[in-house]
Image (cartoon, grey):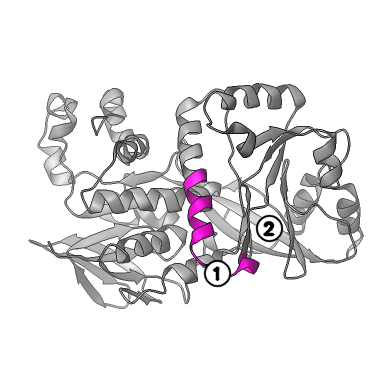
């Protein structure tokens, strides 16, 4: 088998996949449309990494737990500079009753729960300079990372080549090769292709059925060394990240299919309001400032908020098949050697590294039982199958 692959997109998904494949012997070329890596949703100065669990969605919680524990352990062993990440903890502020119910539900799921999370008490509130009336959960392994530093580190491998300013216009299949054409008429060939370009994943004929919504997010930051601030990430309606390079970062707004590229005053005000309960002095300090810096980017998310990770169908073969033939997963008309990793939403830096690792195992035909469970959950063809009344088989593409 030829072990060369083209990866479209140099955000956290593309860079993670490139890293894992290069370290398993693949020659990887990343094609990025912008002038540098990590320019889209992966380009914020700092991102928070903490698990966001649901009270009544066991499948999502399993996926979140696997992603979060994998990613935080992986980042720790990569060899990043200690100034570019910290996993000292993250607090999610929640109503007291909700927090207690969630903690109880997670206790049955998590081995060594005491090291993983704890309900906020007076000791924790005092330790992290928070209001005594606050409630929620402390996730001991949560934290933050510098996205550009992480992505740059991942692609420093002799088997990885990155080419910028390459906006891909089409992806076509020949006998045993994939042919990618750019807007400026360049052509790239490879035996394998992975599409990791977030909200643009459906721009090609082969993938136009993969619907994603784009959510505009604005983050803000201020320079301040004078305030006594929490030393860990704190999340409420918004989030507040500890001082990084003399700046405090907070955010983020969430507006579906809003494509205004400008940093907006009204969104800055929303972000300030979202951290009022987190730190009242910081909130008041922000209100007193004449101007506050910010950045806008877009996060791509599917309707069910689950990413698209795996393979897609060959549209020509699919047209020739009857619904009853598709009732068995072993009859699915998969498109050979083309893969998808997209739709990670606001949890990109939690989900994408783990999903890229699983996708690497799929490409190498070396799936574990847990990998198969994950790919059943993230099946990119789940919507097409559900429309054919094949919802059950959509989540059982691998036998586990």
Q: Is residue 214 visible?
A: no
Residue closest to the eye, 343 or 124? 124
Q: Earlier in the sequence, mark 2 or mark 1?
A: 1
> Badge 1 local density, few (<14 within 10 Å), some, or many (20+)?
some
Look at mark 2 in the image and give the residue it sits on. 219
- Point out the stretch of residues depicted in magenta: 68-84
Q: Main secondary structure of the magenta part?
A: helix
Horizontal and vertical percent for residue 93? 74, 37
- Magenta stretch holds residue 383: no
- For discs 2 and 1, the disc positioned in front in the rendered view: 1
Horizontal and vertical percent for residue 370? 34, 37
Look at mark 1 in the image and give the residue it sits on. 149
Q: Quadrant location of the C terminus?
A: top left
Q: Are marks 2 and 1 in contact (CB under 8 Å)?
A: no
**In the shown orientation, is residue 3 left or right of residue 176?**
right
Secondary structure beneath disc 2? strand
Q: Quadrant location of the N terminus?
A: bottom left
Residue at (80, 33) in percent of width and height: 121
Residue closest to the eye, 32 or 376? 376
Task: Please determine whether, in this image, residue 47 is positioned above or below residue 115.
Answer: below
Residue at (36, 77) in percent of width and height: 163
- Rounded to the nearest whole Å, what is the CA distance between mark 2 and mark 1? 18 Å
The quarter holding residue 20 reads: bottom left
Give the number of the disc on residue 130: none
Residue closest to the eye, 83 or 184? 83
Task: Please determine whether, in this image, residue 48 is positioned above or below residue 107.
Answer: below
**In the shown orientation, is residue 349 left or right of residue 116?**
left
> Badge 2 local density, few (<14 within 10 Å), some, or many (20+)?
many
Horizontal and vertical percent for residue 193? 25, 60
Q: Is residue 256 visible?
A: yes
């Amino acid at each position: 088998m030829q072990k060369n692959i083209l990866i479209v997109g140099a955000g956290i998904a593309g860079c993670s996949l490139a890293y894992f494949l290069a370290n398993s012997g693949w020659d990887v070329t990343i094609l990025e449309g912008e002038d540098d890596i990590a320019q889209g949703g992966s380009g914020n100065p700092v991102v928070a990494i903490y698990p966001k669990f649901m009270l009544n969605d066991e499948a999502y919680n399993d996926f979140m737990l696997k992603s979060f524990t994998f990613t935080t352990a992986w980042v720790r062993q990569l060899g990043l500079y200690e100034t570019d990440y910290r996993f000292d903890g993250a607090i999610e502020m929640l109503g007291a009753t909700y927090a207690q119910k969630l903690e109880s539900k997670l206790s049955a799921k998590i081995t060594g729960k005491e090291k993983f999370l704890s309900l906020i008490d007076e000791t924790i509130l005092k330790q992290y300079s928070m209001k005594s009336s606050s409630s929620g959960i402390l996730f001991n392994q949560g934290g933050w990372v510098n996205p550009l530093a992480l992505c740059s580190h991942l692609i420093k491998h002799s088997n990885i080549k990155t080419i910028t300013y390459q906006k891909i216009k089409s992806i076509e299949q020949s006998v045993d090769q994939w042919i990618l054409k750019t807007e400026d008429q360049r052509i790239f060939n490879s035996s394998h292709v992975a599409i990791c370009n977030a909200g643009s994943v459906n721009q090609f004929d082969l993938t136009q059925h993969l619907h994603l919504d784009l959510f505009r997010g604005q983050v803000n930051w201020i320079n301040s060394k004078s305030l006594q601030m929490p030393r860990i990430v704190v999340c409420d309606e918004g989030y507040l990240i500890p001082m990084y390079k003399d700046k405090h970062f907070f955010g983020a707004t969430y507006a579906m299919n809003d494509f205004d590229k400008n940093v907006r005053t009204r969104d800055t005000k929303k972000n300030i309001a979202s951290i009022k309960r987190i730190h009242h002095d910081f909130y008041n300090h922000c209100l007193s400032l004449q101007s506050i810096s910010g950045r806008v980017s877009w996060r791509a998310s599917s309707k069910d908020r689950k990413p698209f990770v795996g393979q897609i169908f060959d549209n020509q073969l699919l047209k020739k098949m009857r619904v009853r033939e598709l009732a068995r997963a072993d009859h699915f008309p998969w498109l050979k050697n083309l893969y998808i990793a997209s739709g990670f939403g606001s949890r990109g830096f939690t989900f994408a590294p783990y999903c890229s690792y699983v996708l690497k195992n799929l490409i190498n035909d070396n799936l574990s039982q847990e990998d198969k469970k994950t790919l059943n959950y993230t099946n990119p063809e789940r919507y097409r199958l559900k429309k054919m009344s094949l919802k059950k088989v959509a989540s059982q593409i691998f036998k586990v």
